[in-house]
Amino acid sequence: MIFFGIKNTVFLLIRMEFLRFFREPSRLIAMIVQPLLFLAVFGAGFQQNFVIEGRPEISYIAFFFPGILAMVVLFCSIYSTLTLVEDKATGFFSYVMQGPGGIFGAILGKSAATTILAFLQAMLFLPLMLFLPIELGRVNFSLLLLALLIGSIAFSLAGVMLAWFSKTVSVFHAVMSIILLPSWLLSGAMFPLDGNRFFWFLKLVNPMCFFVSILRSCIIDYGFDTQKDWILISIFLVVLIVSFFIIFMEEKRVYAR
């Protein structure tokens, strides 16, 4: 009975999130147009002046495209959890947590819905590689899909956690303005993070750095040594999962009173 309750709750929240997504055409358009604008504007602007030392054959657009994929995953993962803040404010999520799936089913369902949306949106951008100066024969598609899936899970969990502790939509937006765009800009998505101790420190503490580095190694040269990045993003994912377990236990204790 518990399993079916959790399963039904998860499917319900996934269905609701997709209905919300497709009933808001502006949200869908923004999620598609924004990365394309970044790629077109910055790609065209830096294409002639950007050269990677020792790798002159790599164009800026090819260098920048993995950062665009990371942007799609990050922005979709975070902004999709905005609905959690609204559901908590209206009391809907409280009813879901008191349903057959309980707190675990509610949190799992919201996280799964956000993960699926982020992963599918990233998949929509993969065909762009056919029209960009990227050597498809050197793209490691299996690792690329795995990296996108792990990134979608990790940043969806991060988004749900931030939304969980945001009391209002304005607080959520304030936190996002401080964390969201800076974490992407300082991830190496637009320019290499080399030759500076501050950037070296960022590579160790900014999860987006690991994610962008892994995606880039899969797309333009999967011979790069990214073992450390895989380990760091796995640690980041484990920390998030443990944090959610702690939240689950705390909420369960509160509702048991």
Image (cartoon, helix red, strand yellow):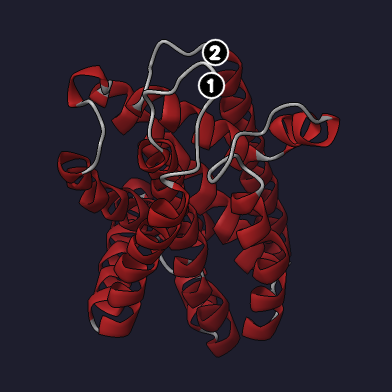
* Front-lying residue, 194 or 186: 194
* Front-lying residue, 253 or 36: 36
**Label pair 1/2, CB-CB below 8 angstroms:** yes
* Type of amino acid at the residue the image marks with label 1: Trp
Figure check: 60 above or below 41: above
The residue under label 1 is 230
Could you tell me which residue is drawn at 53 percent across and 43 percent down?
189
Q: Quadrant of residue 171?
A: bottom right
Residue 106 visible, this angle: no
Q: Does 3 sit left or right of 86 as displayed?
A: left
* Percent coordinates x, y for residue 226 in the rendering: 53, 16
Figure check: 138 above or below 26: above
The residue under label 2 is 227
Residue 166 visible, this angle: yes
Could you tell me which residue is drawn at 70 percent across and 31 percent down?
203
* Percent coordinates x, y for residue 33 in the rendering: 32, 70
3D distance between C-alphas at marks 1 and 2: 5 Å
Figure check: 20 above or below 40: below
